[in-house]
Image (cartoon, coloured by chain):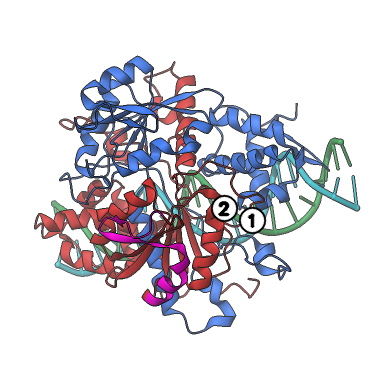
Chain colours: A blue, B red, C green, D cyan
Amino acid sequence: MATGRTHRPATRSRGIPEATVARLPLYLRALTALSERSVPTVSSEELAAAAGVNSAKLRKDFSYLGSYGTRGVGYDVEYLVYQISRELGLTQDWPVVIVGIGNLGAALANYGGFASRGFRVAALIDADPAMTGKPVAGIAVQHTDELEQIITGNGVSIGVIATPAGAAQQVCDRLVAAGVTSILNFAPTVLSVPDGVDVRKVDLSIELQILAFHEQRKAGEETGAADEAASAQSVAQETPGAAAAAPAPLAPHRAAPGAGSDNGRQDNGRQGPDGDVPAVMPA
Amino acid sequence: MATGRTHRPATRSRGIPEATVARLPLYLRALTALSERSVPTVSSEELAAAAGVNSAKLRKDFSYLGSYGTRGVGYDVEYLVYQISRELGLTQDWPVVIVGIGNLGAALANYGGFASRGFRVAALIDADPAMTGKPVAGIAVQHTDELEQIITGNGVSIGVIATPAGAAQQVCDRLVAAGVTSILNFAPTVLSVPDGVDVRKVDLSIELQILAFHEQRKAGEETGAADEAASAQSVAQETPGAAAAAPAPLAPHRAAPGAGSDNGRQDNGRQGPDGDVPAVMPA
DNA sequence: GCCTGTGAACAGTTTCACAGCT
DNA sequence: AGCTGTGAAACTGTTCACAGGC
């Protein structure tokens, strides 16, 4: 077994870097597309282009999973799809509850990508009695009172919070108390959870603010264009080949420059008040 | 490109690290909350707790902005709010257009955090003629045909794409051609854009898949609890003080473990087909 | 004494470049 | 010849620990 022998716990549980884990879904999506077109194999170069990363990074990432490619040939699409799915835990079905069925919650409930890959919306929960029983995305909304029962009854371990900021911590506490150990938080608040519970955060206004930062910077350097236009904004390099070399004969656009490192995972902390930032949804 | 690589080493601090930029909005939110409670100053320790990071990181982050604190005292809340706002470019108003007014687009349009800090929804655009003229969040939806005119007429440089995956690249191309240079993409696709255009991506299913990965890992190690429960899942450390030491006398929960490094910024690449993953919104 | 600001050590991630298999 | 897999180098980000001002 090429399972690197000496050091390197390669296939062992501790191993895959977070940065790599965060990219696996990207590869999986690209591979799924290839699979649907019945493409049998891909080279790291091709797959990397489809996923929007560079090939060295992709190969390194795959090397943490094991040696699933064939030198001189490339990777077997179907096999890789399976291996990555397994690694991500998508071969099993994850029941998910969405709490807070406003516009955002409804959008999430209707999100096809949800159901398509390992996730199943087990229940929609909202605090508004007027919503109870109303079907959203084919599922009847249930009242918050039944939250605990829904969680335990369905063995739910992943919860999505799409409530207003003011209600998020409370909902979070109840989810955790009922047994949820992974939370995807759309409310603009820092959630406090016990050790062992994972929180990932998606925050609209933060994303916009980061864009504004770069936008402002662009405006400020609108002067010396030609020379270092792209690199000046600290947007840095990626796709050294595409961006630097080839004039791209037919493609109308080129690669988006990428600068790594953001966080999507929440850290820690306790926010003082409750509702500081306006909420995403009505009720 | 290969143009030497514009070093920006100098004593002239023209380079705030991306990781720091990504946290500034977090600090800003915590500071705004303090400001509303008329708190005059905060220590790095307090502010860090409110923002969910550790104090050393926060101090380092602020050091890139300059020396805005007072030794022995802390930071002046109002002053810091101003400095960070300025750094992020929020002292000016950014007109934003949202393309794709389905559930998600509507949720974004209604998002209060949008308007509250520097961003103004200049227009809502949808390809469905049935939507045209309908008011969403108090703004009449306009048809895609007017996209270019809206962008140039309002000097819009930031666009939000909330369309189905299949339409995203097309919309993106038109936005860019019309002058947009920053895009927040909610469609599950890799967008290709020319150099100089920033793309940030928010992808629901990716976030869920990352959670599933950790969740799976937790299940697999449900055995040896006590000893290294938290660290075993590679969720790593953050808040060394809180998580490792102090038994937290009164707080009901503790810090959420944080592992850094994700990406929210898209990289590069050209996707082969168009609509592989189901879209977020109906039409 | 308290708390900021920061150099220096450390850790994680990306890129390079090439050995090695097919 | 072509392409993967991977050490090693380069780089980015985080943590430590303490000098230095209040």
Q: Position of residue A18 (x, y in %)?
A: 50, 41
Left of B177 or right of it: where is D16?
left
Q: Which mark is residue A217?
A: none
The chain containing the residue under callout 2 comes to B
Q: Position of residue A15 (x, y in %)?
A: 56, 34
A61 shown above or below B105: above
Q: Which mark is residue B190?
A: 2
Q: Which residue is mark 1?
A: B270
Placement of the C terminus of chain A among the 4 image quadrants: top left
* Cα–Cα gap, marks 2 and 1: 7 Å
The crowd level at tag 2 (other Cα within 10 Å; few <14, some 14-19, many 20+) is many
Q: Is residue A259 magenta?
A: no
Q: Position of residue A262 (x, y in %)?
A: 44, 52
Q: Quadrant of residue B156?
A: bottom left
Q: Give the extent of the magenta segment.
A: B130-153
Q: What residue sits 63% from the left and 71% below the top? A: B1
Q: What residue sits 44% from the left and 60% below the top? A: B18
The answer to whether one can see residue A186 in this image is no
Q: Is residue B138 magenta?
A: yes
Query: Among all residues in the image, which is located at the extreme front?
Result: B130
**Amino acid at dot 1:** Arg
Q: What residue sits 49% from the left and 41% below the top? A: B206
Q: So how many labels did they put on this image?
A: 2
Looking at the picture, tell me which residue is in the foreground, A74 or A9: A74
C18 shown above or below A128: below
Q: Quadrant of residue B257?
A: top left
Left of D15 or right of it: where is A126?
left
